[in-house]
Amino acid sequence: MTVQSRIEAVLSPLGIEVGFAATHLQSGANVAINPGILWPTASVFKVPVMVEVYRQAEAGRFGLSDRMPMPDEQRTVGSGVMQKLAPGLAPTIRDLVMLMTIISDNTATEMLLDLVGAEQVTATMHRLGLHDIHVVLNLPQLFAHVYHLPLSPLPDYAAMQEAMRTKPMDYDSLAFAMTAENTTASAADMAKLMALIVQHEAGSAAACTDMLAVLGAQQLRDRVPRYLPARATANKTGTFKGIRNDAGLMLRGPDDTIAFALFTFDRTPLPLDDYRLLAIRNTLVNDAMAETGQILWDSLGRGE
């Protein structure tokens, strides 16, 4: 069986929608499933945010060692720890990038996105030739759409927490739309962005080296990199109910690198309080993503 057919055999039985692209950078060997379709990125959009932070830092707008106090109004629900910490915290901008990336901290993300601007993130992606990466909605806007909350003014942190406890996510909302009006990307362009980082083409060599170090410190490795050596992968996951994504790099050795992006949309209805079904679907999809990672690691670009 080819690498393509083996991966399709892993993913097809799940009954989910898949966008996938992976390329062995040295040989050009590649596999793809719906690579050009736009997908809700969930937290994978934080990689383009990171690239823009480094671009603006190199332009002299701020320094990565500058400290940013955490405003109470930027506490953001969902993943991360900053929302639970005491007021007055003032991490460096690089610390915020690290938190945004390796534990997917949403409060750190909002602080950085407010600093650099979503429109600037998208513009930089397009300048890099990545016209299928769109950072349009920030995290509070995504949560407001998915829970049908007011957009102006946006609900405060307590109201968002209450919505998470009491409202189901709406798969028909803009937050799940596979269009450029949502924060979306194609698997092909997200994999290309990872390639640009490791090839030192997403910024200066120093910036790309540091971005790769941040991605390599990833704590969330239960999807594509699960079975792979810890120091040989650099990735960013993204999760929304029904959305389970992963994008990154496999560093098998000198001049032996795979760039990948795997986006999934599982439209299985998930009742608000059915945590068992959610856990079962998470396990099924995450296991398949891990198997996909193993196949890529073992075979892509190795003549199979």
Image (spheres, helix red, strand yellow):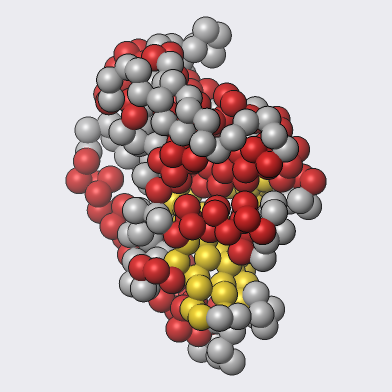
In the image, what residue occupies the spot 49% across and 40% down? 94
Residue 21 at what x, y percent from top left? 60, 65
Residue 223 at what x, y percent from top left? 38, 60
Give the quarter of the figure containing the C terminus. bottom right
Residue extending furthest bottom? 303
Residue 131 at what x, y percent from top left? 75, 47
Left or right: residue 91 compared with residue 250: left
Q: How many marks?
A: 0
Residue extending furthest top? 153
Residue 267 appears in the rendering = no
Figure quadrant of residue 170: top left
In the image, what residue occupies the spot 35% across and 18% down? 88
Residue 82 or 170: which is nearer the viewer? Answer: 82
Residue 66 appears in the rendering = yes
- Is residue 153 depicted above or below 264 in this figure? above
In the image, what residue occupies the spot 62% across and 31% down? 62
Left or right: residue 166 compared with residue 236: left
- Is residue 155 depicted above or below 270 in this figure? above
Residue 130 at what x, y percent from top left? 73, 51
Residue 104 or 267: which is nearer the viewer? Answer: 104
Residue 226 or 110: which is nearer the viewer? Answer: 110
Figure quadrant of residue 233: bottom left
Left or right: residue 167 compared with residue 146: left
In the image, what residue occupies the spot 22% across and 33% down? 273
